[in-house]
Each structure stands twice: as C-alpha cells, then as structure tokens.
Amino acid sequence: MSEQNSLTYAKVNEDVIRMLDKPTVKWLALFLPVLGFVGFGMFCFLYQVYTGLGVAGYRHPVFWGVYITDFVFWVGIAHSGTLISAILYLFRASFRVSIYRIAEAMTVFAVLTAGLFPIIHLGRPWFFYWLFPYPNQRELWVNFKSPLLWDVFAVSTYLTVSSVFFFVGMIPDIAAIRDKVKEVPRKIAYTILSLGWKGSNWEWLHYSRAYLYFAAFATPLVLSVHSVVSWDFAMANLPGWHTTIFAPYFVAGAIFSGLGMVITLTIPIRKIFALEDYITLDNYDGMAKMIILTSLIVGYAYGVEFFMAWYSGSPAEWGQFYYRVTGEYALFYWIMVVCNVLIPIPLWFKSVRRNIKALFIISIFINIGMWFERFNIIVISLSQGFEPGAWGIYKVSWVEMGITVGSFAWFFMFFLIFIKTLPAISIAELKEILPVPKKEAKHHG
Amino acid sequence: MDNQGVLGIFSYVDLTVNAVRKLKDAGFKNLRVFSPVPNHEIEDAVGEPESIVRFFTLFGAMLGTACGIGFTVLTSSDWPIQVSAKPIVSIPPFIVIIFELTILMGSLSTLLGLLINSRLRRNAPRNMYDPRFTDDKFGVMVTCGKDNVKKVEDILNSQGAEEVKFDGV
C-alpha cells in the first residue's frame, strides 16, 4: 500500500466526508434519468399485474424466463460484496479495505433487487407472503422439502445478515461524519445512526469481536445462498439442470459477475470523486486476479457440462447441450462463452490489470456475459426437455425487458443515494492500514 | 468516591499507551481510552478481559439450530403430507433451513451482544467526549477521586497530553 502512505488520519476523514457534500449537477443528471427508468419499470409491473402474466413471454414449455434470470443474476451480483467484505477480511487481504464498503452496499442493493423478482414472477404477487411459514387458519405449513422455500430462507437471511454487516461496519464512520457535519438536520440523522459511538476501548473491544463473528457467519452464508439458488434448478429432473456441479459453478459465477460489477461501479466513482489515492491500481490488480480465477472455474464448468452430457450417455442430456451450441439460442450461448471465458484472458497480463479503461470495458462484458449465462441455463434447458413433442421457443416481451431495465435503474438509484449519504469508503479500516501516528518515528503497518 | 473525570488528549499512539501504563502503575483502574481506530497496543496497555460478545454469538447460533430443527420437524409432523415419496421428517432438505436459521439467529444475537455490551458501560459524562476522537486524536479518560485530580493531571501532562480537561461525574 505504498501509494497510501501520503495519507494521514485527518485527510482520510476529510476526503471521505467530502464525498457527502451537496449533490452536484452531474449527480442529478445521473439520478433523474435513473428515477425515470425506475418509474418505467414500475409501470411495466403494474401493467403486468393488471393484465396478467400473459404479457410476459411465457409460453409452453418455458415458464421460467427473464424474471428468474434477473433473480439469479442479481443474487450473483450480491456475492462478491460479501466475498470482499467478509472472506477477504478473514484472510486479511489489505487490498479490500478501500473498496469493501462499496462492494457491501452493492450486495445489499443487489439482494434488494433480486428479492423483487420472485414476486414479480408470481401470478398473484399480492399473495407473496404465502411463501413464509406463519400460523394460519388452514393450519397449513410450507413445504420444507422444496428448493423454492430454501430460497426464501436463504435470500431473506442473506438480506438480513448482509444489511446488519453493512450497517455495523459503518457505525464508527457515521460517528466520524456526525462529529464533522455542521447542519442541524444532518447532524441529528448521523447522531441517531451512529448509535452514540464514541470510539472508546470498550466499544472497540466488542466491536472488533462482533465484526469478526459477522465475517465468520457471512462467509459460509454467501457460499450457501448461491448453492441454494443453484439447487432451484439442480433438484429438478431436467436435462441441463440436473447436475451436481451446479452449486460450485453458480458460486464461482456469482463471484465472477459480482467482481465485474464492483469494477464497473468503482471506476466512475473513483474518477468523479478523485479517489485515486484510495482506490489504487493495486486494488484493481487484486480484483482482476480473482476475476481470472473465477473465469477459469466458470470456463471449466462450461466444458465439464459437455463432457458429462456426453459421458452420461443420456440422449436427452446430450441433445440439450448440442442444442445450446447450435440451436435457436446459439447466439446467446456464444455471447456467454466469449464474454466470460475469452474476454477476461488479457487480464493475465499485468499491464491490462492495471489499465483502468481496459478493466472497465472487460467488466461490462462480464456483466453481459453473466446475464446470458443465467438466461441460457434457465431458458434453453426449459425449451428442450425430454419430450420432443413438448419443445418450444420463448421470446422475451417488452414488459420483461422494461422490468429488467427498471431493475438496473432501481439498483443504481439506491447506489446513487448511498454515495451521497453514507461513507462510501471505510474511514476506520483505512486508518488501520495507515502507519500509526507515533511521536518516535517507528512505522507499523 | 471516584467522581471526577480527567481527560487527556493525545496525538500519538505511543504517548497514549505510555500514559495508560503510567496511570495504571499509579493505581488508577477506572480508565477509558478513545481512539479513531482499534489498536492492539492500547488494548494491551488497558488490559481488557476478552469480549463476552462470543457467548451471545454461540447462544444465538445454538438457539437458531434448535429453532430450525424444531420448526421443520414439528410443522412437517403437524400436517403429514408425503411429498416426492420422501419421509415426512426428511433430514437432508431440512439441513438447509437449519443452517440458514443458525446463521440468521447467530448474527442477530451478535448484533444484540454488541449493542448491549458497548452500551452497558457508557458511564462517561457526555462533555468529556471530544469530536476529534473520530478524526485523528486519542484520549485517555480517568475517573478518580477529587484528591487525585492533580496527580492524574501531572501524569497526563508529563506523558505529553496536548490538552487536559476536567469534569464532575
């Protein structure tokens, strides 16, 4: 972290709190269109509620389409946030420090977005609470043997735990803002949110312990959530879905796509707020290396799927995979392969990993590729099952596209609000990796 | 009676740690150190016992496991419908629910443990806190008897405190 040695404790406070100044015209120029798209997405949803699910492209035999694709995509995006904040915390990887808050915020907002899709996908969304086990007059309980119910537990636990982790991590930083801001309404808001944090030794003692336990809980949780999501598919006896590799394949894919999204989000923020001293090329280098690893795992999974389809000797399985590369959806399949396996290859070179423009472009392609990966798994498998008589084609409708675009806007809306209201870089943790201020100039990292 | 608060403000960790050591040597036990970051040297100097948050975590996680087992087994037995030719009480799928509830309740009780424990001992007078403690200053607060105030002040000053403040409790 040699680039961060010029920073001091006071400068960190100043720079991070500076990001919370009044919204600029540029921020508004981003925020207003985003609000417009959120509105359009809501309009599409209301139109679908009013008209019925027929306005989505669902046709026999494909009854899981873009909404479920979006669900899996957003849950996946959430994952690298927890990876960076919890897993890398446990491994004491210092390159996480300046980016983890942004990644964590991304996690919370992505899960918030993901959680909408199973509800949007329901024929009667107003009965979504039937998914939860609660005592009712029919004395009926939910079916705990269904992977869809595991999802309810996994995703709601994930949302709760990652929100708690996100908030607890921010408490000392919110206190730092509280002590700096002058305007009364802001002061009151930050005072309440800081929960009276004073930074005394007792607080730090319990805080450090609690934070470690949160990280220790979040780590297996993050691996379980995407495994559970993958079992939504893998538990079903359908060619293309029914495979044991799905859990690790989905988890690697989730981290891969999430890292792509972290890079896509942090590059503009770094530029706009002039955070080059904080989010350094070393940070990107570290993330790019993890992208290489996860890209390799994902690429390996693509290959193994074909091998298993061939080696199993199941004509339906082999037919499904042959159809993926040559059928009506072949274009989507090849987009996926190019974006997720080929485009990240230049990251093997250090000069590319440290080239911000190249990283930004690669990260966009990763986002696209991973969306298509989910689409391919879900839709292509459903459209060609066992029975040739029951094969069919699914076409995405404008309502589904509208809601998908709306979901991206919804995610960015939360993100833009976050950037202007909460500390986007962890003040306390950043100070921890700076040299400790000592009278006798000894440097401890 | 310990009823007077004396606060010394420092800019450097080593001076803060020395002051804490000196104060402890002089027999002052009621110390509170403020810092913008957690610091092991300060922790060692103050000599705090291990945080009890871990018991909250353990208890919450165990409670979550118990709830997960109880919830799945009891509700399945309450309305026994056989699904997919599987036993009514079928452990492998229940493990997922049990796992998630363990994590959920373990995390929430950790949060509770954190809030309770860092609040319980919040006995410092409000005006003894300095907003610079979240920025770049360190503080050592001693609660002592009225007759010892001068002694504490001298120790703090001799260890390089930039400012010393007083307050009654």
Image (cartoon, coloured by chain):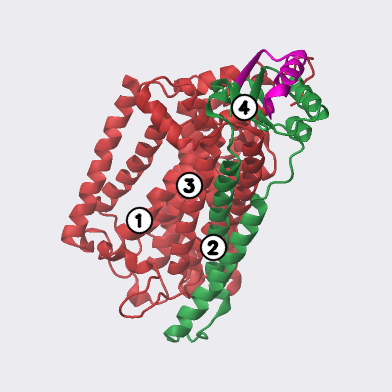
Q: Which label number is shown at residue B100? A: 2
A273 w.r.t. A152: above or below: above
Q: Which residue is mark 4?
A: B36
Q: Which residue is mark 1?
A: A117
Q: Residue A230 location in percent, x, y? A: 50, 62
Q: Secondary structure at mark 2?
A: helix
Q: Which residue is mark 3?
A: A163
Q: Which label number is shown at residue B158? A: none
> What residue is drawn where x is 27% and y is 32%?
A33
The subunit carrying tag 2 is: B
Q: Amino acid at mark 2?
A: Glu
A48 w.r.t. A296: above or below: below
| Earlier-in-chain disc, 3 versus 1 | 1
Q: CA distance from mark 4 to mark 1?
A: 41 Å
Q: Are marks 4 and 3 in contact (CB under 8 Å)?
A: no
A236 w.r.t. A83: above or below: below
Q: Pick whichever, B36 or A228, lies toward us.
A: B36
Q: Amino acid at mark 1?
A: Phe
Same chain assignment for discs 3 and 2: no
The subunit carrying tag 4 is: B
Q: CA distance from mark 3 to mark 1?
A: 19 Å
Q: Pick whichever, B30 or A406, lies toward us.
A: B30
Residue A137 visible from this viewpoint: yes
Q: Secondary structure at mark 1?
A: helix
For chain A, what colour was chosen? Answer: red
User: Magenta segment, which residues?
Assistant: B141-166
